[in-house]
Amino acid sequence: MQTHGVRCLLMGGQACVFYGAAEFSRDTDFALLASPANLERFTAALVYLRAERIAVPPFEAEYLQRGHAVHFRCHHPEAAGFRIDVMSVMRGVAPFDQLWDRRTTIETVDGDIVDLMSLEDLVLAKRTQRDKDWPMVRRLVEVHYLSNRAQPEPAHVAWWLAQLRTPALLIETAVRHAGAARMAAGTRPAVARAIEGDASMVDEALAEEERAEREADRRYWLPLRQELEQLRHAQRGDVAPPPNRRE
């Protein structure tokens, strides 16, 4: 991607690996700028990787801009069988230009430069209906908390009170930052329970929070999934393809 000048950010499981919240990931997920020039550069990278699109939708800007993911499988000898998934628009996540401005850039031990979606944005992207994402959300916020709790900035505290999913750490934050916790309690029931110091009640509030987020994600994806099903039928010649817009 860097060789071909592609404007993209690593996200998904491999980004979680870099942040210390996962041990491995089988796929590479990118947030991709869906501009014509950038898609042209990405296409050149796909050619180099000998990558073919798998499944639907087609690799077209209109599908990316409506929130679809597009999937590829690589056949280059050094990346044989490797899967690449790209998205440009995600539920509850800022537009790409904002993601790019607050990205995390790291250098590996081999000297490679990697642009990651920021940890805060990655947490938002992971709040989905999938079972495997919620342990990652919890671990990502734990990593941020444990790395910064010795000398936290006000913005850190506000983010922890909004995103921590570990009852003991949320209670600890509410005790250490009582004023900020009282302000946050009005919009997050889990914080109100943390102020009371009842871990079981915090856990129940967090479970309800997760259920609500999963349902919101399910509703968001429902029309997109219906569109994918129409595309699959159209690909088989069963029906006409869906219109080029999302209702």
Image: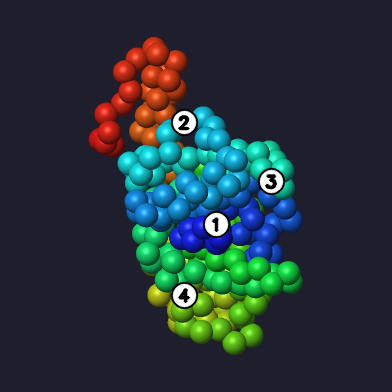
The foreground one among 24 and 221 is 24
Q: Residue at x 39, y 12 (%)?
A: 238
Residue that mark 4 sits on: 158
Residue 100 can be seen, yes or no: yes
Choose top left, top right, bottom left or bottom right for residue 220.
Answer: top left
Q: Secondary structure at mark 4?
A: helix
Q: Secondary structure at mark 2?
A: loop
**Mark 1, residues whose alpha carbon is within 10 Å: few (<14), some, or many (≥20)?**
some
**Residue matched to label 1:** 1
Amino acid type, callout 3? Ala
- Residue 182 in percent (x, y) is at 44, 75
Looking at marks 1 and 4 on the same chain, the residue that comes earlier in the sequence is marked by 1
Spatial CA distance of label 2 from label 4 is: 40 Å
For label 2, the residue is: 56
Image quarter hosting the C terminus: top left
Is 56 displayed left or right of 82 in the figure?
left
Residue 150, given in percent of the width and then of the height, sits at: 64, 85
Q: Residue at x 43, y 39 (%)?
A: 59
